[in-house]
Image: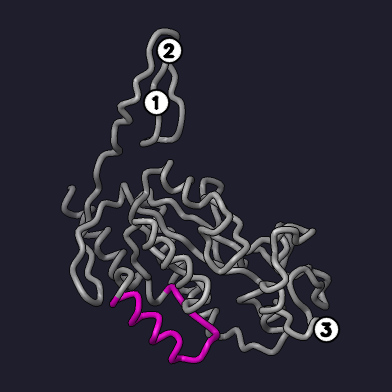
């Protein structure tokens, strides 16, 4: 009896006598995508999108940031473009990876220095503390850490909890992407200049091709922080495009295949 072990394209075919470890590649699905600096030719069969921290604590009026006085309106600007883009990427068989801050209840992997960033006086509402609605801040499986209701999630989407601004630090994200054979990454979510940028930088350092989806990325930081992020991505770490350019490239590929 022959069976497959692993996740294509990182899969073997085995039986009692042999193991086929050739790992046949996924059929290529190239598209041509305009960006701020260059026209890219990329393979959707090697692409995934990371949707970072589109969570109640960061984007909901009753979440943590709003509770401590941050205007979350700018963060919510990424919701409508993501609602437009994500169904198109699913249809194109591009994995949707929800990369969400979701701490352990005991916070044993969170250092004092990291906790200080989010509660510098020790008297406010920081990581793991409860909001007025009872939800513990950024706690795994809590309302606070859940993706905002406006963004539809599907059973076959991929979920990764993170515990730092970078989604690659102390998480299985790199192993998951390599098993899926995904080397081109689209980045979206909040905050552009913090968790999105930190994750994108680490992805670049690990050898991934990085594309920031500008209209699907937002921040509650001052506008100059977003401008600096876009500049640095274009200058040092990858490319910047938008949701309409991606969907247009996918549609052009579909028409060309008919």
Q: Do the residues labelled 3 and 1 touch (CB within 8 Å)?
A: no
Query: Can you give x and y, in whole percent of width and height, for residue 72 in the image?
Result: 60, 84
Query: Can you give x and y, in whole percent of width and height, for residue 54 in the image?
Result: 56, 69
The crowd level at tag 1 (other Cα within 10 Å; few <14, some 14-19, many 20+) is some
Extent of the magenta region: 216-235
Distance from disc 3 to disc 1, alpha carbons, whole Å, reads 54 Å
Q: Mark 2 points at which residue?
A: 15
Q: Is residue 218 left or right of residue 208?
A: right
Q: Name the residue under label 1.
A: 12
Dot 3 or dot 1: first in sequence order is 1
Q: Residue at x 55, y 65 (%)?
A: 151
Say which of marks 3 and 1 sits in front. 3
Q: Mark 3 points at which residue?
A: 123
Q: Residue at x 58, y 55 (%)?
A: 170
Please, what secondary structure does the residue beneath circle 3 have?
Answer: loop
Among the 4 quarters of the image, the one containing residue 108: bottom right
Please, what secondary structure does the residue beneath circle 2 have?
Answer: loop
Number of callouts:
3
Among the 4 quarters of the image, the one containing residue 204: bottom left
Please, what secondary structure does the residue beneath circle 1 have?
Answer: strand
Query: Can you give x and y, in whole percent of width and height, for residue 239 in the image?
Result: 29, 70
- In reply to whether residue 234 is colored magenta, the answer given is yes
Q: Is residue 130 left or right of residue 177?
A: right
Q: Residue at x 46, y 26 (%)?
A: 5
Query: 35 or 16, which lies in front?
Result: 16
39 to 96, vertically: above or below: below
The crowd level at tag 3 (other Cα within 10 Å; few <14, some 14-19, many 20+) is few
152 to 231, vertically: above or below: above
């Amino acid at each position: 009896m022959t069976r497959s072990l692993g996740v294509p394209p990182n899969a073997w075919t085995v039986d009692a006598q042999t193991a086929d470890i050739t790992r046949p590649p996924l059929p290529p699905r190239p598209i041509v995508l305009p960006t701020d600096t260059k026209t890219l030719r990329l393979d959707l069969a090697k692409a995934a999108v990371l949707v970072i921290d589109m969570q109640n604590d960061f984007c909901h009026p009753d979440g943590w940031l709003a509770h401590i006085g941050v205007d979350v309106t700018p963060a919510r600007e990424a919701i409508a473009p993501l609602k437009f883009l994500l169904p198109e990427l699913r249809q194109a068989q591009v994995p949707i990876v929800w990369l969400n801050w979701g701490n352990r209840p005991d916070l044993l992997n969170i250092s004092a220095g990291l906790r200080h960033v989010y509660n510098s006086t020790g008297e406010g509402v920081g990581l793991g503390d409860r909001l007025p609605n009872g939800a513990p801040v950024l706690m795994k499986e809590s309302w606070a850490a859940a993706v905002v209701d406006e963004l539809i999630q599907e059973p076959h989407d991929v979920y990764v909890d993170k515990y730092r601004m970078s989604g690659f630090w102390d998480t299985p994200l790199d192993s998951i992407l390599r098993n899926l054979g995904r080397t081109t990454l689209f980045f979206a979510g909040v905050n552009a200049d913090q968790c999105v940028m930190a994750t994108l930088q680490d992805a670049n350092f690990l050898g991934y091709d990085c594309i920031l989806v500008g209209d699907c990325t937002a921040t509650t930081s001052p506008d100059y922080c977003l401008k600096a992020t876009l500049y640095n991505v274009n200058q040092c770490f990858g490319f910047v495009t938008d949701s309409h350019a991606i969907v247009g490239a996918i549609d052009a590929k579909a028409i060309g295949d008919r």
